[in-house]
Image: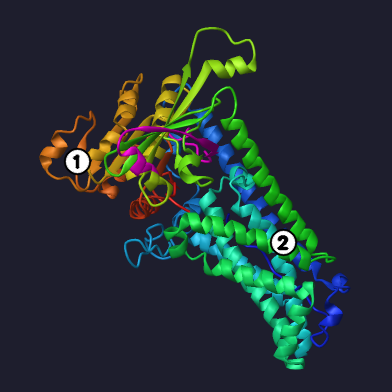
Amino acid sequence: MKYFIILPFIGLSSAKDAESESKPVWSSHEPIHLARYSLLSFSCTAFAYLIWQLFSRYNNHLRQLSTFGHNNQRYFVKPSNDILCWLKEHLIYAPLFKVRHNREFRLWKNIHMGTVPSRFHSLLIFAMVSLNIVLCLVNVPYQNRNSAAKAIRKSTGTVATANFIPLVLMAGRNNPLIRALHVPFDTWMLLHRWLGRIVVLESLVHTMTWGISYAEAESWRTVFAALVGGSFLRDGFVATCILTVILLHSPSPIRHAFYETFLHLHFVLAALTMAFLWVHLDGMHSQKFLLTAMILWALERAVRIVVLVYRNFGPNSTTANVEVLHGDAMRINLRLARPWTFQPGQHLYLYIPAVGWWTSHPFSIAWSEDTHLDECLPSSEDDLLGHRQSTISLIVQRRAGLTDHLFRKASKGSITYRALTEGPYGNIHSLDSYGTVLLFAGGLGIAHQISFVRHLVSGFTEGTVATRRIFLVWVVRSSAHLQWVRSWITSILAMDRQRDILRIMVFVTQPQSTKEIQECLMTVPIFPGRPNIETLVGMEIGNQIGAMGVMVCGSGSLSDDVRHVCRRRQSTSNVDFIEESFSW
């Protein structure tokens, strides 16, 4: 779990008399208006972005409707708004500095130091930090040192408590703002981490202003005695200590190197902090903010449990068949207990209790099929479920933890487990309104992109999408990796009218020899080396039909290269850039 929890010690009435403050009778003096300003700012920002998204979705929908019945989309080829083009090039799509955004910084091969936020993300982070600084200092009377310390102590505690509500909301898999605002989960996790750091710093300031003021008036021995003497101070201090531990165990190198341990420890520490904090805030107005956050947390967990039970327990049970592929990869075929309806770009969380107990990992849904078991007409809902069997397939890279255990167990032959699936999540990006779609996939990123190819080819045949050109570019290290999706590509190439709309190119960056590529039994062009992104994008723009959507799912370096080229084309062509991150 990824929740930072907040701050103990909300405003003491006097640094000289801790015993009299063991019962917070002064709770009416909490600066609750600061907390309300904080939550109001978050709500207004979300509402403004919602208006922007609704306007954008409405325009995309009109663009899609205008293409039904004819192929002329020349009106949408060129950009229609110079201001929007400038914003996309210099703010929305722009990395913080030059080109690098999603390519990880690494000290060594396995030490992940994180990525650089984009300019738009940096602006949000800057606004969040600035707002918290202003709210914590706006009411401070700087003329008197003791009064200033007391005001800072109260404001940092109250603001941190209010921050707990968006902090919990951002970390949830079922965050309703993901679908409402079309903001992906990885962006919410970025904001969650930064808001968590802010909350921890506010808690430390809150605690230290009390401790230092009290020590100056009395002594540090008296401070320690006060902490031990009553539950109010003790529980708040313990919550602060746990928050500090959460901050120290959350940096990117630790989070990526020991993800499963981090996740479980994060959950336990957050739960402990909430327990101690609830006691500490007893009788205060700020406890209502904590209660709201706890309700949001409980509801999100309850929804996950209900979905997990509904999806996996019924007339049948969910099973996972694991098959080892070339290149330290696996294909996991899931036969679901209940039929699902999937959309392109979705992912799920997979539990295999026999291997990973309660551990779950997110995987893109590469392929899905429904099988009708017999021709009899169903007479009830149970009969309907019994007559339809959904099967989905995942392509999984071998890593540490769950995937490594699965790979070793399946290396001797395919193996089947009882499994649990949670989801589907995602599907916030639609490509249906674009006349030209360019898809870049790096390695296992093909699992995300191939579902869009299938959907768009089918929609073109049925006349339900605006797409008239699809160009898939897949970059792999070895030609052996082509076996991952060979059967699915063959199925797509057998679809009606795919020749009128689809082109595929495969680039093998580390071929053993030219003969190795020539011997591949794929029916698509295969080239050695890395693709020239500038040339490929320029080629599509030269033959562009309608608006152009460019989606990339792959390594950070591939994403950054595609982003850079798309930014440079904003002033001359109507190009939207969409990035699907590999990790959070």
The residue that mark 1 highlights is: 527
Q: Which quadrant of the view contains residue 355?
A: top left
Q: Residue at x 87, y 70 (%)?
A: 28
User: Alpha-carbon neighbours of circle 2 within 10 Å: few (<14), some, or many (≥20)?
Assistant: few
Q: Position of residue 72 (x, y in %)?
A: 42, 28
Is residue 273 visible in the rendered structure shown here?
A: yes
Q: Count every numbered label the image shows and give the total.
A: 2
Question: Which of these two is toward me, 10 or 137?
Answer: 10
> Which amino acid is tagged 1?
Phe
Q: Would you place residue 289 above or below residue 331 in this image?
A: below
Q: CA distance from mark 1 to mark 2?
A: 59 Å
First reached walking from the N terminus: tag 1 or tag 2 = 2
Does residue 416 belong to the magenta stretch?
A: yes
Q: Position of residue 24 (x, y in %)?
A: 85, 73
- SS at mark 1? strand
Question: Which of these two is toward me, 328 or 92?
Answer: 328
Is residue 92 visible in the rendered structure shown here?
A: no
Q: Position of residue 279 (x, y in %)?
A: 78, 65
Question: Which of these two is toward me, 531 or 311?
Answer: 311
On screen, residue 580 versus residue 288, left or right, reads: left
Q: Which residues are magenta?
A: 406-435
> Which amino acid is tagged 2?
Ala
Q: Nearer the viewer, mark 1 or mark 2?
A: 2
The residue that mark 2 highlights is: 275
Q: Residue at x 52, y 66 (%)?
A: 249
User: Alpha-carbon neighbours of circle 1 within 10 Å: few (<14), some, or many (≥20)?
Assistant: some
Quarter occupied by the N terminus: bottom right
Q: Would you place residue 318 above or below residue 45 in this image?
A: above
